[in-house]
Image (spheres, helix red, strand yellow):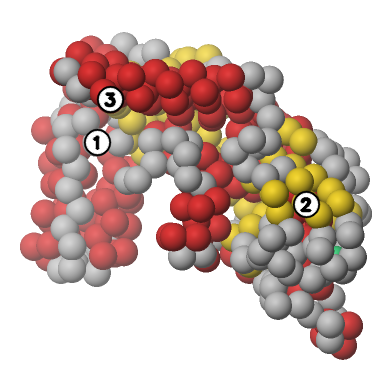
Amino acid sequence: MRHSYAWRNFIRKPITDFLMKRTVSIPVNLPSERFLPLMNECSEIFNAHIDWALANRTYNKNKAHKELYHLLRLQHPCVPSALVQTIRDNALEAIKATKFKRIPRKKPTSALRYDKRTMTLRGQQLTLSCIGKRVAIILNVPDYFKEIFETWDFCAATLTYSKPSKQFWVRLVFETDDPPKQEEGKVLGIDRGLYHIVSTSNGQFFSGSNVRANQRRYLYNRKKLQQKGTRSAKRRLKAMSGREKRFMRDCNHCISKKLAALNDVKTYVLEDLSGIRNQRRNKKVNKWISSWSFYQLEQFLTYKAEAKGKQVGYVDARYTSQKCSRCKQRHSTNRHKSRFHCKTCGFKAHADINAATNIKDDYILSTAPSESVEQATVNSPYVSTSFSG
Ligand SMILES: [Zn+2]
């Protein structure tokens, strides 16, 4: 997995017309002396079902129940019967999905899936089946997720355990067949950059309060440590990169929240940075803060906007910063650092705002009925369909 845990949860998922799903992961304190043996026994029950399915070349749940249930209850008397049934369903669905080609296996601390038979959620209190009595925990739901938590349907939970940090996590899945309605509103072009994290087509800049000072400090410290090259320097470098990431993550959360909260905006348009060749991208994203931060902002903005019934669109990233947003002529010399000055029509603007305006215009052109696109510019825009929900 390329991404750290922190935003693995927000990787976009295909969204059907009828069901929208969203997940959140929350760290929880559970008695490990009860849950670790449970996870271990559950993995054994899971693997027993897999072995049975392979030996009998079937994933029929009723047959599996008849042949295995009583045996497994005898072998694992402490595991609640509802949990055995949930694991049976999970195991047989896993083998069905792989069509016997791959053998799904669980390790002693593999994730454990709960469903409506084995857990209940009342308010913020989650109750989980366990060895012996059920265990109730109070969930600390992050602010950004509260609206979904309170209004969508809760459908599943997965319990995971991180060995290095000795921490349990629950990953909760919520769904709705009634996604928030599309709000009436405008299109906002968004240019992502290093100086201002976000510049918008309506002339606003967003950057964390002391992002730039922090960035400079990190860059400086990093250079010094890299020059040193000792083992302790390497260790500190690694710890610092975690700090940088957390800092940028906070900035990205904060900015995407502000953007998603803009009431009159219905569509946010970003440059599709995945489409440009590496060389070009490096020109745009060439400092310590590599493309992950841009991508993370994209992820955060997408789920926050979607939760409000808004959408995120994309345009081709080429030339957005060289083109004049008034006359649409392109000169490579139009831009000088943060100043944009058009050689053709004399238009002057902040370079990032000019780019954001182009991003917005490209998107509007790309979504307009085809007859009105006759004056499409060199920068032929397009809309990513992966976000239509
Ligand atoms: Zn111009």
The residue that disc 3 covers is 226
Q: Is residue 31 left or right of residue 353?
A: left
The residue that disc 1 covers is 110
Q: CA distance from mark 2 to mark 3?
A: 36 Å
In which image quadrant can residue 236 be found? top left
Residue visible at 69% across and 73% down in the picture? 379
CA neighbours of label 1 inside 10 A, class few (<14), some (14 to 19), many (20+): some
Q: Is residue 124 left or right of residue 281?
A: right
Up-down: is 385 above or below 43?
Answer: below
The residue that disc 2 covers is 340
User: Is tag 1's residue or tag 2's residue first in the polypeptide sequence?
Assistant: 1
Q: CA distance from mark 1 to mark 3?
A: 38 Å
User: Is tag 1's residue or tag 3's residue first in the polypeptide sequence?
Assistant: 1
Residue visible at 29% across and 56% down in the picture? 94
Residue visible at 24% across and 36% down in the picture? 110
Residue 376 location, x and y as percent? Answer: 79, 80
Amino acid at the residue labelled 3: Gln
Residue 277 location, x and y as percent? Answer: 46, 65
Nearer to the camera, 113 or 109: 109
Amino acid at the residue labelled 1: Ser
Assess whether mark 2 and mark 1 are in contact (beta carbons under 8 angstroms).
no
Amino acid at the residue labelled 2: Phe
Q: Secondary structure at mark 3?
A: helix
- The mark closer to the camera, 2 or 3, is 2
Q: Secondary structure at mark 1?
A: loop
